[in-house]
Image (tube, helix red, strand yellow):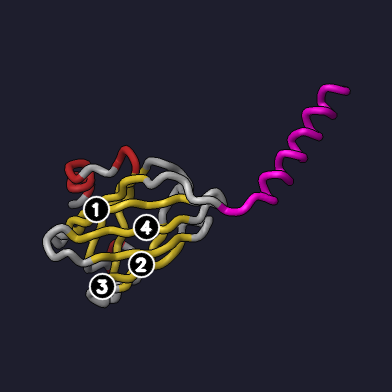
Amino acid sequence: MFTKFITASLGVSAMFALSACATMELSGIPITSVSSTGNVMQGEITPRTDFTSSFALTEEETGVVCQGQTGANGQGNMSCTDGRNYEIHIPDYPGFNGSYVATYDQNGSLVGANDATELVAVGYGDDSDIGLLTGMLP
């Protein structure tokens, strides 16, 4: 009983100590996207200790830069230097490795697969691989 109390007390103390710390950025993680229209973007996502993140990607052929942020729920926005804007929702967030396919309409809004005009395979960490992502697209 005494051991459980000490463990619980230490856990609560650690939780308060962590919540009192300032949000810090962690090391960057590679991120790659491949679209159904053939665009390839590569860059880095920078997670923070509060589970939010910032990211920047560059389109290989045109040099267009897109950057944005996500909240602790993996949702956010991305703006590009050519005027495009996209909604972002990273499923199974947070994590250091993962991949998914996002479906967008012509306005950059996330939509169901039946209404999509563009599919984008996104991979980060170990899944930041152009071949893997290309294989995820129909």
Whole-angstrom CA distance, mark 1 to mark 3, is: 15 Å
Quarter of the picture holding the N terminus? top right
Question: Is disc 1 in contact with disc 3, using a CB cutoff of under 8 Å?
Answer: no
Q: How many marks?
A: 4
Horizontal arrangement in the rendering, residue 108 relative to residue 62 (left or right): right
Secondary structure under tag 3 reads loop
Q: Amino acid at mark 1?
A: Gln
The residues tagged by marks 2 and 4 sit, at their Cα atoms, a distance apart of: 9 Å
Q: Earlier in the sequence, mark 1 or mark 3?
A: 1
Asked if the residues shown at circle 2 and circle 4 are in contact, with their CB atoms under 8 angstroms apart, the answer is yes
Mark 3 lies on residue = 81
Disc 1 to disc 2: CB gap under 8 Å: no
2 or 4: mark nearer the eye = 4
Q: Residues within 10 Å of mark 4 (few under 14, many from 20)?
A: some
Residue that carries the numbered disc 2 in the rendered image: 78
Query: Mark 2 belongs to which amino acid?
Result: Met
Q: Please tell me whether mark 3 or mark 2 is closer to you in this view.
A: 3
Q: Name which of mark 2 and mark 4 comes first in the sequence.
A: 4
For marks 1 and 4, give the CA distance: 10 Å
**Magenta segment:** 1-23
- Left or right: residue 60 versus residue 4 is left
Q: CA distance from mark 4 to mark 3?
A: 14 Å
Do the residues bearing badges 1 and 4 touch, measured as CB atoms within 8 Å?
Answer: no
Residue in the image at 22% along x and 68% along y:
117
Q: Amino acid at mark 3?
A: Thr
Question: Tag 2's secondary structure?
Answer: strand
Q: Give the image location of residue 83, x and y in percent.
A: 26, 77
Amino acid at circle 4: Phe
Residue at 30%, 41% (x, y): give it.
Answer: 127
| Residue linked to disc 1 | 42
The tag on residue 55 is: 4
